[in-house]
Image (cartoon, rainbow, N blue to C red):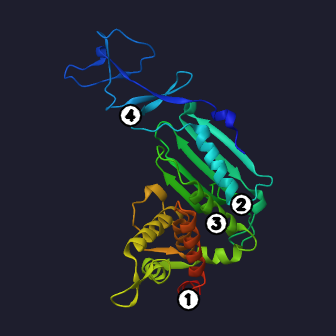
Amino acid sequence: MFNHDVCNFQVRKVPLYINHMFIGENGTLDRAVHAYKPFDSREYGEVPRSIGVGIEKDDGTMLGIVSDAYEVVQYNDIVEQVEEALSISGIDTTDANFDTNVYNGGAQLELRARFPAHEQTIDGRGDTVIPEFCFRTSHDRTWANNGMMGLWRAMCYNTLVSGDKLAYIYGRHTKNFNVPAFAAKIRGAAEYVASDGMDKMRAWYNTPVQREQAIDLFTKTLASRMDNVKREKVANKVMLSNLMKVFDEENRHILGQGAYEGYGKRDAGTLWTAYQAATYWSTHVDKPASKAIREDKVRKMLASDAWGQLAA
């Protein structure tokens, strides 16, 4: 898929050193320099690792300064995980275009893919849209692990890139993302643009759902439990809280301004973001048996009266 040669280099953490000539009169640190070889200790001193360490390429290029607890993950390892997620998602890669871009000497990595096999019209105006995948990460902490799948116009009438974000994932660079969960999101986005599910999911995407309605939906379906005292079904508060947190995040990233928007600023989403929250919950589990149970609950939710009333 992607060009592994472009990011075929290793990075490592290295100590930083202080040049005492750049220590200010008040004792503040004005400049830190990286030592490529040992220096005379009378002139240079090592920066305590608790303050920070450097990230260095195998050719000696410095990419950034990070904490000592920072976990180095090589780009090709990340690329392989992204490729695995795309492969198991089942998306049609016929005639797909894959771009691998490295910026700032290797500090940043961007992966892009377009899937013309899934070309569709989503707005009913006749202009075609093509699913495009974008994933970014970095070694200098400017980009966390973040990926998204969206529909992008083949012709951009307003000179701006325009599209609907259908699936996303975001996480710290020091933590590997959950491949099965990401693959499920990509699969959901692929189903959205597939001919057999386009109409249904287009309706979900455009059906507004108030936050209170989402709470009621999950209370009656995925987060439902039997109270042995009241002898009636009530909400599993922990499960409901987890589902609503994902629902809020889906609305923030798909309908809102993403990382630029504060958490919990929206009181409404759509059936699509509720569906995304449910499928994320069903796949974000390690045990296969638990995953199967959760997936079955999602299928039952889609066939429930609570879902049907919202869809209507």
The residue beneath circle 2 is: 90
Instruction: Pick out the residue farthest to the right.
Output: 95
* Amino acid, disc 1: Asp
Query: Is the Cβ of the residue at disc 1 closer than 8 Å to that at disc 3?
Result: no
Q: CA distance from mark 4 to mark 1?
A: 53 Å
Which numbered disc flags the more N-terminal residue, 4 or 3? Answer: 4
Closer to us: mark 3 or mark 2? 2
- 140, above or below 95, in the image: above
**Residue 68 — which label?**
4
For disc 3, the marked residue is 188
Q: Is residue 242 visible?
A: yes
Query: Residue 140's spot in the image, x, y percent?
Result: 47, 36
Count neighbours of disc 3 (C-alpha within 10 A) and say few if under 14, some if 14 to 19, many if 20 or more. many
Q: In x, y percent, where is residue 136?
A: 56, 46
The secondary structure type at the circle numbered 3 is helix
Q: Give the spatial CA distance, label 1 vs label 2.
A: 30 Å
Alpha carbon of mark 1 to alpha carbon of mark 3: how far?
A: 22 Å
Q: Position of residue 219 (x, y in %)?
A: 44, 81
Q: Residues within 10 Å of mark 2 (few under 14, many from 20)?
A: some
Label 2 amino acid?
Gly
User: Callout 4: helix, strand or loop?
Assistant: loop
Which of pointers 1 and 3 lies earlier in the amino acid sequence?
Answer: 3
The image quarter in which residue 231 lies: bottom left
State if disc 4 and disc 2 touch (CB < 8 Å). Answer: no
Q: Nearer the viewer, residue 177 or 285?
A: 285
- CA–CA distance between discs 2 and 4? 39 Å
Image quarter (top left, top right, bottom left or bottom right) of the N terminus: top right
At label 4, counting other C-alpha atoms closer than 10 Å, the crowd grade (few under 14, some 14-19, many 20 or more) is: some
